[in-house]
Amino acid sequence: MSQENKTAEGFGMPWEDIYGYAQAVKKGNTVWISGQLGHNEKGELADGMEAQMKQAYANIKELLSRFDMTTENVVEEVIYAMDMTTAFEARKNFKAEFYGNPKAVASTMVGVSGLALPGQLVEIKIVATV
């Protein structure tokens, strides 16, 4: 992928520089959002699966807005969860609210045995298009 016409965004979190990655990258009409954690602007994780998931989706909305996009532009999500049962329960409580339609995107949920940070329960990766 050529670097030309590619735009990257981040939150200024220390791990962005330490590990060398962007929170989101736009090339052409597509935005790829890196796996979002349920952390606030200070990098602190929310408590519990549902709170982390809601914060991760809030972070996704913020990144989309930087590219003049909304959740209407999301075409795919991948959710990585430490506990699938808890994640399914948490997600069903607000997916329609986030997307406006519970069947709005292609979605995959994957159970994992570990994530990047201690206490992290979920990570959500997004693809959006114009």
Image (spheres, rainbow, N blue to C red):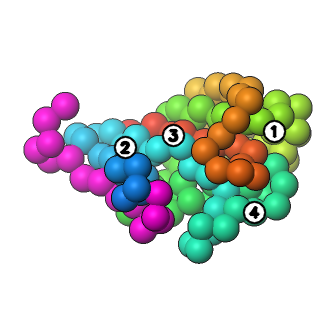
Q: Quadrant of the C terminus?
A: top left
Report the front residue among 56 and 72.
56
Compared to residue 76, the image places residue 124 above or below, namely below
* 5 drawn magenta: yes
Compared to residue 127, the image places residue 110 above or below, namely above
Report the front residue among 32 and 42.
42
> How far apart are the alpha carbons under marks 3 and 2?
8 Å
Q: Earlier in the sequence, mark 1 or mark 3?
A: 1
Q: Which mark is residue 126?
A: 3
Q: Residue at x 83, y 34 (%)?
A: 83
- Amino acid found under the numbered disc labelled 3: Ile
Q: Which residue is mark 1?
A: 87
The reply to whether callout 3 and callout 2 are in contact (CB within 8 Å) is yes
Q: Earlier in the sequence, mark 1 or mark 2?
A: 2
Q: Which mark is residue 31?
A: 2
Q: Earlier in the sequence, mark 2 or mark 4?
A: 2
> How far apart are the alpha carbons under marks 1 and 4?
14 Å
Compared to residue 115, the image places residue 19 above or below, namely below
